[in-house]
Image (tube, rainbow, N blue to C red):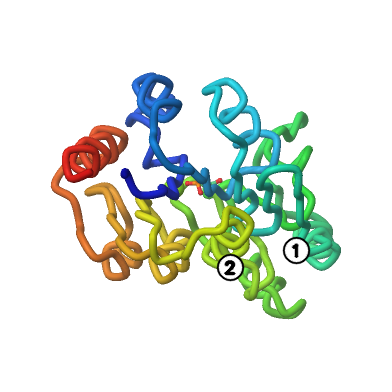
Amino acid sequence: MAPPLVLDIDGTMTRPDDSVDPRFFDVLPEWDAPVVVATGKAFPYPVALCHFMYVEQNVIAENGGLVLSGEQVSKNADGEAARRVAEEYVAAGYDLGWGPTDMVNRWRETEVAVARDQPLGPLAELAAEHGLEVVDTGFAYHVKSPGIEKGVGLESVAQLLDRDPEEFVAVGDSENDVSTFGVAGESYAVANADEKAKRAADVVLDESYSEATLSVLDELRSRA
Ligand SMILES: O=C(O)COP(=O)(O)O
Ligand SMILES: [Mg+2]
């Protein structure tokens, strides 16, 4: 039996140009165990990804702010404080950095994301004033509650799937995957991962991006 998987999206299922590697559309529907997609992206993105891959919708979105498994959705933060941080950041003359049609935050319920070309210092200061933290995924700054993490989300998805979190094999690329690596039984950081993810992973891969993740899946399959 293949082990259940928990896969990050950006930097892990994607190629260097940010596109999802189409090979997952063949590999994951055939996977012989649950697949959980765990991302910092807003809820509709991973739900749509599962939908179009035609795999069961086991989703951790917004870094654990929203969790979906089977018919059950849990919302683990209200996003109020994060939205206040965003308002104060903008009132201080800064910008969230996504242009007039902000699709990054449009459906975001429990946190706020800011583009990485915007100043981090004042954002981190405002977040701290509201008891929040800023996580840098390499794709965006996420203003979130410290207790909300992908790893906590994995514990609840595992429970709903009647699995032990330790059974999961995790692949990720950034500091928002550190908590997942702490909960899963086996963890891999792709070569393009940041230092925090590399330190937290059981194995740091030589390959990068989706190429690395697909190699892990090949190896797991040959083990099964
Ligand atoms: O939304 C982001 O900033 C990163 O998304 P990821 O967690 O799928 O890598
Ligand atoms: Mg990532």
Q: Could you tell me if the residues under marks 2 and 1 are in contact, i.e. CB atoms within 8 Å? A: yes
Q: Is residue 127 visible?
A: yes
Camera-side residue of 16 and 34: 34
Q: Is residue 42 left or right of residue 13?
A: right
Q: Which residue is mark 1?
A: 76
Residue for badge 2:
152
Compared to residue 23, the image places residue 179 above or below, namely below
Is 98 above or below relative to 24? below
- CA–CA distance in space, label 2 to label 1: 10 Å
Image quadrant where one finds the C terminus = top left
User: For residue 125, what is the image quadrant?
Assistant: bottom right
Q: Is ligand 1 less than 8 Å from the beta carbon at label 1?
A: no
Residue sitting at 41 percent across and 47 percent down?
Answer: 5
Is label 2 in a helix, a strand or a loop? helix
Is the residue 46 above or below the residue 38 in the image? above
Q: Is residue 120 visible?
A: no
